[in-house]
Image (spheres, grey):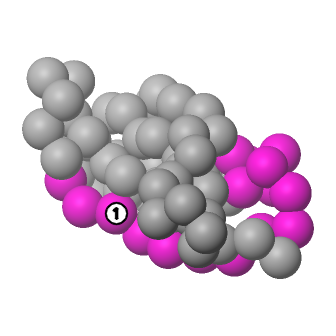
Amino acid sequence: MAEYYVEFKDAVGNSHGDKYFNEPTDAAALTKGQNLLTAEHRGNKRVTVATVYQRTVVSQRANEVGELKV
Protein backbone atom coordinates (compact mmCIF):
# COMPACT_ATOMS: atom_id res chain seq x y z
CA MET A 1 0.00 0.00 0.00
CA ALA A 2 1.29 3.39 -0.97
CA GLU A 3 0.22 6.71 0.49
CA TYR A 4 -1.36 9.22 -1.87
CA TYR A 5 -2.97 12.60 -1.58
CA VAL A 6 -5.25 14.57 -3.83
CA GLU A 7 -5.13 18.36 -4.03
CA PHE A 8 -8.32 20.15 -5.08
CA LYS A 9 -8.24 23.33 -7.17
CA ASP A 10 -10.65 25.63 -8.97
CA ALA A 11 -10.40 26.48 -12.67
CA VAL A 12 -8.02 29.39 -11.95
CA GLY A 13 -5.63 27.21 -9.92
CA ASN A 14 -6.51 28.32 -6.38
CA SER A 15 -6.16 25.52 -3.86
CA HIS A 16 -9.26 24.27 -2.03
CA GLY A 17 -7.70 21.68 0.29
CA ASP A 18 -6.44 18.13 0.04
CA LYS A 19 -7.13 14.60 1.29
CA TYR A 20 -4.79 11.72 2.10
CA PHE A 21 -5.50 8.04 1.43
CA ASN A 22 -3.82 4.66 0.87
CA GLU A 23 -4.18 2.52 -2.24
CA PRO A 24 -2.25 -0.46 -3.64
CA THR A 25 -1.65 0.90 -7.18
CA ASP A 26 -1.55 4.15 -9.14
CA ALA A 27 -4.64 3.11 -11.12
CA ALA A 28 -6.60 2.53 -7.90
CA ALA A 29 -5.38 5.89 -6.60
CA LEU A 30 -6.62 7.68 -9.73
CA THR A 31 -10.02 6.02 -9.38
CA LYS A 32 -10.22 7.01 -5.71
CA GLY A 33 -9.05 10.53 -6.62
CA GLN A 34 -11.81 10.85 -9.23
CA ASN A 35 -14.39 9.75 -6.66
CA LEU A 36 -13.05 12.25 -4.11
CA LEU A 37 -13.08 15.03 -6.73
CA THR A 38 -16.70 14.25 -7.62
CA ALA A 39 -17.71 14.33 -3.96
CA GLU A 40 -15.82 17.59 -3.34
CA HIS A 41 -17.40 19.16 -6.46
CA ARG A 42 -20.88 18.32 -5.17
CA GLY A 43 -20.21 20.36 -2.04
CA ASN A 44 -18.24 23.18 -3.69
CA LYS A 45 -19.02 23.80 -7.36
CA ARG A 46 -15.85 25.89 -7.78
CA VAL A 47 -13.66 22.80 -7.35
CA THR A 48 -13.13 21.40 -10.85
CA VAL A 49 -9.55 20.05 -10.91
CA ALA A 50 -7.67 17.60 -8.71
CA THR A 51 -4.09 16.40 -8.87
CA VAL A 52 -3.16 13.03 -7.35
CA TYR A 53 0.32 12.69 -5.85
CA GLN A 54 2.13 9.71 -4.37
CA ARG A 55 3.94 10.60 -1.18
CA THR A 56 7.51 9.39 -0.91
CA VAL A 57 9.43 9.21 2.35
CA VAL A 58 12.96 9.04 0.98
CA SER A 59 13.10 12.11 -1.26
CA GLN A 60 10.78 14.35 0.81
CA ARG A 61 8.89 15.07 -2.41
CA ALA A 62 5.68 13.84 -3.94
CA ASN A 63 5.46 12.25 -7.38
CA GLU A 64 2.53 13.43 -9.51
CA VAL A 65 0.41 10.49 -10.61
CA GLY A 66 -2.18 12.35 -12.68
CA GLU A 67 -4.51 15.29 -13.05
CA LEU A 68 -8.28 14.83 -12.96
CA LYS A 69 -11.15 17.08 -14.05
CA VAL A 70 -14.89 17.09 -13.38
Give how far across and how far down residue 45 sits, in percent. 23, 42
On screen, residue 12 versus residue 38, left or right, reads: left
Which residue range is magenta in the image?
16-31
Other-residue count near label 1 (Cα within 10 Å), few / some / many at <14 / 14–19 / ≥20: some
Q: Which residue sits at x=37%, y=33%?
A: 49
In the rendered view, would you say 4 is above or below 67?
below
On screen, residue 26 versus residue 4, left or right, reads: right
Residue beneath disc 1 = 18
Q: Which quarter of the rendering shows the N terminus?
A: bottom right
Q: Which residue sits at x=42%, y=41%?
A: 50
Give how far across and how far down residue 65 sits, in percent. 64, 40
In the rendered view, would you say 1 is above or below 35?
below
On screen, residue 10 versus residue 40, left or right, reads: left
Residue nearest the observer in this picture, 65 or 31:
65
In the rendered view, would you say 11 is above or below 51?
above
Examine the rendering and report whether any part of residue 15 can be seen.
yes
On screen, residue 8 versus residue 70, left or right, reads: left
Q: In the picture, residue 4 is in which quadrant?
A: bottom right
